[in-house]
Image: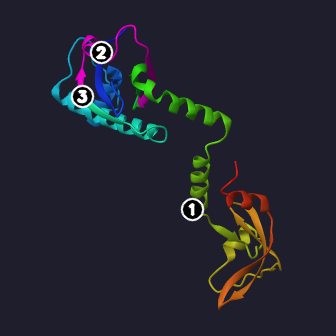
Amino acid sequence: EIVVPTNFNIVAVRPLRGNGLIVCDPNLVFAVIDALFGGAGKYHTRIEGRDFSPTEQRIILRLVEVITAEYKKAWHGIYPIELDYQRSEMQPQFANIATPSEIVVATSFTLEVGESTGTVHFCIPYSTLEPIRDVLYSTIQGDSAEPDRRWVKLMTQQIQDASVDLVVELAHAPATVEQLLALKAGDFIELDLEQIVQANVDNVPLFDCHYGTSNGRYSIKIDKILNHQTLKWLGDDNHG
């Protein structure tokens, strides 16, 4: 059952032939409008039986632009498409993109806006997608046969570029709360320095090291790699 008003947006699917349909249910539309104007994203007024106002139409158009931009990004790695906005309708009989007997590929997304949820439906006639059927089929087959190496390489690069803190604890001194409260500026704390210290990242030990100086600066020298397999995996672009 379609509630009036429901927003139907017709978009041309380039370079393929035919149009697609983006359907935004009224709960989503009015939740977005309410949130944009400072509300909690929950529309309490009865909305059935009336048309969208010009202001609401402009906000809907902005929402559709965001949806189409994200949809194009999702298709980019499979088959680059452009979604050109054509027009909006509020009556389903004026938003035909296929004949009643034609197969339509439909995808639905549930979105949360504030306290409300709404659904976006994206419909494309099968006849529009048929010219690239082999491309879609080969993509599905490739994904099932082996991992996406482009994704693995990108993820590996992102991991290698991530910033981490390498922490080396040179010494520690046990103390009671009473001793801590008694400390004052100028006091000395005796430390027992270990000859070998561990270098950690996020409390995970990676290296055994010696400490000293190099080029006039305090330094550590790596003696042993403790998690060799982990470091090897992070530096390998061909794993997976």
Residue 4 occupies which quadrant of the picture?
Answer: top left
Find the magenta span and give its range. 87-112
Please state the horizontal and vertical placement of residue 126, each as a whole percent of the image. Answer: 43, 20
The answer to which quarter of the image holds residue 65 is top left
**In the rendered image, which residue does mark 3 sit on?**
86
Amino acid type, label 2: Asn
Query: Pointers 2 and 1 in contact (CB under 8 A)?
Result: no
- Residues under labels 2 and 1: Cα distance? 49 Å
62 above or below 4? below
199 sits left or right of 26 in the view: right
Which residue is located at x 61 percent, y 43 percent? 148
**Front disc: 2 or 1:** 2
Q: Is residue 222 above or below residue 73?
A: below
Q: Secondary structure at mark 2?
A: loop
Q: Which residue bears the numbered disc 2? A: 96
Q: Quadrant of the N terminus?
A: top left
Res. 87 in view: yes
Q: Earlier in the sequence, mark 2 or mark 1?
A: 2
Locate residue 33: give its quadrant. Answer: top left
The mark that comes first in sequence, 1 or 3, is 3
What residue is drawn where x is 77% and y is 74%? 173
Q: Is residue 104 magenta?
A: yes
Nearest to viewer (mark 1 / mark 3): 3
**97 or 108: nearer the viewer:** 97
Reading the image, the residue beneath label 1 is 161
- Mark 3 neighbour density, 10 Å: few (under 14) some (14–19) many (20 or more): few
Q: Earlier in the sequence, mark 3 or mark 2?
A: 3
Along the line of sight, the residue nearer the viewer: 167 or 240: 240
- Inspect the image, locate mark 3, and give the three-letter code of the amino acid beneath it: Gln
| Local secondary structure at mark 3 | strand
